[in-house]
Image (cartoon, coloured by chain):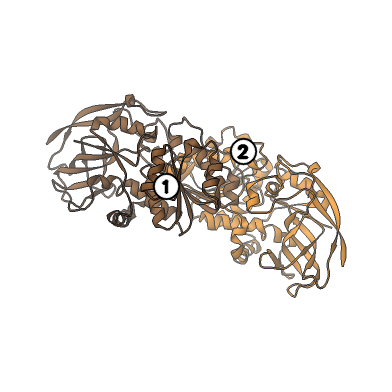
Chain colours: A brown, B orange
Amino acid sequence: MEVRNRYVATRRHIEGAPTEADFEVREETARWSPDSGEVLVRNLYLSIDPYQLNRMKRSSASHLAVDGILPGQRIAAYAAGEVVASASPEYAAGDVVAGVLGWEDYTLFRPSPAVLMSKVDAAAVFPLSHHISVLGTSGMTAYGGLFEVCKPASGEKVFVSAASGSVGSLVGQFAKLAGCYVVGCAGTKAKVDLLKDKLGFDDAFNYKEEPDLKSALKRYFPDGIDIYFENVGGEMLEAALANMNTYGRVALSGVISEYTGSRRRAVPDLLEVIYKRITIRGFFAWDFLPKFAEFNAAIGEWVRQGKVQVIEDVSDGLESVPSAFAALFSGQNVGKKLVKLA
Amino acid sequence: MEVRNRYVATRRHIEGAPTEADFEVREETARWSPDSGEVLVRNLYLSIDPYQLNRMKRSSASHLAVDGILPGQRIAAYAAGEVVASASPEYAAGDVVAGVLGWEDYTLFRPSPAVLMSKVDAAAVFPLSHHISVLGTSGMTAYGGLFEVCKPASGEKVFVSAASGSVGSLVGQFAKLAGCYVVGCAGTKAKVDLLKDKLGFDDAFNYKEEPDLKSALKRYFPDGIDIYFENVGGEMLEAALANMNTYGRVALSGVISEYTGSRRRAVPDLLEVIYKRITIRGFFAWDFLPKFAEFNAAIGEWVRQGKVQVIEDVSDGLESVPSAFAALFSGQNVGKKLVKLA
C-alpha cells in the first residue's frame, strides 16, 4: 500500500524563537507492505510541545536524550491516530493508538518495547484528544513531576509557573487534589482568570505586571514556597529560590524562557540552595514510562469525576502546525496545544 | 568562677574576601557559677571553616539557617576543649568535649539536645584534632553528602572540586572506598600531587592551568561524571554539568568561589539538568546530626585501619584565627584548617 504523506519539516536549524517561515510542508510516498512488520497509522491529533524547539537547534543538551531534528526531516512527535494497515499481530486496522508518531498525515512504525505506543480503548469515555494531552505526555510530566519528584504533603505551598500551559494547568489541579495551597503565574489576565475561576488555583498572578518577581512571590507566599514546579527558567527560578522554604523542592520540567536564547538565563543563588537544603531535579515524561498505566488510571479517574479540567487549544490541519508551534513561544496558547488533522 | 576570656570578633560586616584587618581579639570576663546549669570549657582546637564568611555578611541566605554574626560579637564555631567546671550532671571537670563552642579561649554552654556537643573518649586512639576534622563537621559533611545525597554505586565516576580542602579530601577518599573512579581538582601542583600520591585519587588536576574547564573535565572523564561533589560554584559547576551523565547527582556542599562575590556566579545550563535528569541538592552537616554517631563509627574505623588519611593544617594561638580564616579564601590551606590554642 502506498499513501501520499505530507509532513512538516524545518527548513533550517532554529536557534532563536521559531517563526512559520522556519517550516515547510513536504510530501513523500509512504510504502507499507504486509511483510514489513510495520503498522501504518493515519494521524488524527498531533501534540505541539515547546521542547521540540531544542531538538531543532544545531546543538543542544536535549540531543543527548532525544534525537536532534535535521532540516527537511520528518519530525517525531506524540500523536493519536487510527491504524490503516498492520503487519504486526499486535495491531489491526481500525485500532486507535496514541504514542510517538509524527507531525505528518501518516506514520509507519515498527512495534517494539522501545516505541511508546498504546492502544486507546474505543469504548473510552474520553475524547481522543485527551490521549495526547491529559492522558499523554503532558499528564505524565505533570503527575510524575509532582508526585514522584516533588512528593507533596497536604498543606504544602506550591508555585507553578507557566501555569496555564499544558503541564502547568494540570500540576496546579493535581496539587490542589493533594491538599496543597497552589499559586500559579501566567502572562495574561484571561489566563490568570482561568487559573482562579476554572482550574481552582488558590491564587494566580500575571508575571508581566510584576516589576519585581521576588517581591511578588513574597506577597503570594508569605509563608514561603515548599514546591516549585518550574516551566520557565530565568528570573522566575531566581525569584522562586529566594522565596523557598527549607527542604524545598524544584521540579525542573522545562525552561521555556531559556529555549529561544532571547531572555537571560537563571543565575540561581547557590547559597539559597545550600542553606535551605533545596533539591533541584531535572526530569521528563519518559522517566515515568514504567508507570504510564498507573498514572493514567489515576488521572483518568479524576477527569471522569470532573475533578480535573482539561484545557485543550486545538488548531486545524497539518499546515497549521508551524503557526501553532511558533505561538507557544509568544504565550498565545492556553492549555495543551494540539493540531487536529482532517 | 571567673576567667579572662579572649575571643575573636569581626570589626564590621564583611562583604568581600576577608582580611586580617576585618578582625580583632577582644576580651571579656566569663563567669561560671555552680548553680548556673552551665559548663565551662577551655578550648583546645578551633575549626576554621569557609561557611563562617556567609555568617559575617550583613545579609546572606545562610542567615536563614545559621545565625548571622554581628561585629564585636563572639563567634560560635565547632571546637574541642576540656571541661574546666560543670554545673551539669552530664559533664565533669576534665571531660574532653567536641561540639559547637567558639573562636575563643573559653566557652560557656548549657547542655541541651539542641546543642551539638559530644564527649570525646579519653582513651581514644585518635588525636584530639581529629574530633573537629574527620570526626567533626567536615567528616559529617563529606560522609553524609557522598553516601546520603549522592548514593554512589561502585564504578561510578566522581568529580570533587576543592579536593584538597577539609571536605573534598575526605569525599575523594570515601568515594574510592565505595569503589568509584575519583578525580579531584585543586589550585596548586603540591595539592594535586597530594591528591594523587597520598590520598589515592585516580587522577587530579590544577584548575588554574586549565583555560577551558569543560574540555579539561571531558579529558579527565571521557565517560562522563556521575557524581559531582561541589565545593566551588561558578564556572566549575557549569563545566561539571556539561560533562555529567544521565541521572547525575550534584551534592552542593559549598560554593567557596561565590562566597566573596569576587568571581562570577554559576549560570547552569538548565537544559543539561533537564535532559540529563540531574539532581542538584543543597545540604549541610547539621542535616545528618541524627546519624552523627553512625557516620563517625564508620569513618573512625577507616582512619584506624589507615584507609583514610587525615590532612590537618594547624595554626597556633587564638591570634592566628584571622589569618587562618582569611587564608581559606586565597587557597593557602591544605586539608582541614585548625587553630590550636595554647
Q: Position of residue A61 (x, y in %)?
A: 43, 38
Q: Position of residue B60 (x, y in %)?
A: 65, 46
At horizontal 68% and vertical 56% (from top left) the residue drawn is B310
User: SS at mark 1?
Assistant: loop
Q: Is residue A101 left or right of residue B179?
A: left
Q: Quadrant of residue A41?
A: top left
Which residue is identified by label 1? Answer: A283
Q: Are marks 1 and 2 on the same chain?
A: no
Where B209 falls versus B75 (above or below)? above
User: SS at mark 2?
Assistant: helix
Which kind of residue does numbered mark 1 sit on? Answer: Phe
| Observer-nearest of B294 and B286 | B286
User: Is residue A38 in view?
Assistant: no
At horizontal 56% and vertical 53% (from top left) the residue drawn is A277
Estimate the spatial distance between the alpha carbons at disc 1 and disc 2, rounded to whole Å.
30 Å
Which quadrant of the rendered structure holds the C terminus of chain B? bottom right
- Density class for disc 2 (Cα within 10 Å; few <14, some 14-19, many ≥20) is many
Q: Position of residue A126 (x, y in %)?
A: 23, 50
Which kind of residue does numbered mark 2 sit on? Answer: Tyr
